[in-house]
Image (cartoon, rainbow, N blue to C red):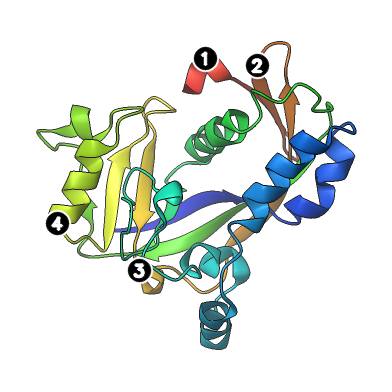
Amino acid sequence: MKSELWRIAEEQVASSLQNNLDADEGEIDFLESLVAETKPEKTLERKFIQMGYHYLIYSQFRYPPPVPSQYQARFKPPFHMNNVFYCSKETDTSLHEYAYHWMRQRLHLKKLKRRAEPRTLFSVKFSDDHMTDLTMHPNLANIMDKTDYSASHAFVKAKRCSSILYPSVRYEGGLNVAVNDIELLSKLPSTRENIWLIFESKIQACQIRMDKLKVTILWSQVS
C-alpha cells in the first residue's frame, strides 16, 4: 500500500501551559507532568536526525523500548518492543482522533481558559507492501473495542506487523494506520499546516480552526 497519511502533532506545549490555565498550581503541574514524563533519551533522537528524518516524523520513534505500561495504546501493549506512529488516511479522521485524546486530558480541568492552543497538521508519504489489513478481520469488533484493548494487544503479540490498517472508532468511515517501522515513512513531511484547538467546556467540545475551515467536534461524537 502506498498512501499519504495525516497526523497532528503538538509543539512547545509545556511553554504555553501557564498562558492557558488560571493560577491553579495543581492543574498546571498535572499537564506539565504529562509533558515531562514523555521526554525521551537523546541517543535515538540523534540517530534519526543523522538519518535525515524530520522531527515530526521521528518523534514517535525516539522512545527506547520496551513501552512503559502507562503509555500503552491500542496496538502498543505494555512492554511492547516497538514504538508506533499512529496516523490517518483522511484529514477528517485525523482531526477526530486527535480531538478525542486532547479532550480526554481536559474534561476534568475546571479552570482551563478558553484560548487557542497551536498544533501542526501534517502529511507524510507511506509505503508498505506487507501491511496488515484488519478491516475485514473476523474478530474486528473486539479488536476495535472503544475502551478495552485486550483483543488488540493479543493480536499484535501474536502477529508481528510492520504496519496495520484499521477502521477508526472515533470517525465513522475513517481509516487509520499504525506504523511500526520508521523506514516505511518519508523523511520529510509532504505538507504542514498550523491549526488551533479550543476547548469549549460548557458543551464539552473541541473547536478546531484551520486556515479556511472551522470544525467543532463534540465529546459525545468521539467517546
x and y percent of residue 150 in the render?
24, 37
Q: Is residue 133 visible?
A: no
Disc 2: CA contacts within 10 A as few (<14), some (14-19) or many (>=20) = some
User: What element does badge 2 sit on?
Assistant: loop
**Label 4 – label 3 distance at C-alpha:** 15 Å
Image: 171 above or below 95: above
Q: What residue type is labelled 4?
A: Lys
Task: Please tell me which residue is depicted at 42% across the width and 57% down the height of the picture.
Answer: 68
Considering only order in the chain, which callout, 1 or 3, is on the residue closer to the N terminus?
3
Task: Please tell me which residue is depicted at 26% across the width and 64% down the height of the picture.
Answer: 162
The residue identified by callout 1 is 220
Disc 1: CA contacts within 10 A as few (<14), some (14-19) or many (>=20) = few
The residue identified by callout 4 is 159
Considering only order in the chain, which callout, 1 or 2, is on the residue closer to the N terminus?
2
x and y percent of residue 64 in the render?
44, 71
Considering only order in the chain, which callout, 4 or 1, is on the residue closer to the N terminus?
4
Disc 3: CA contacts within 10 A as few (<14), some (14-19) or many (>=20) = some
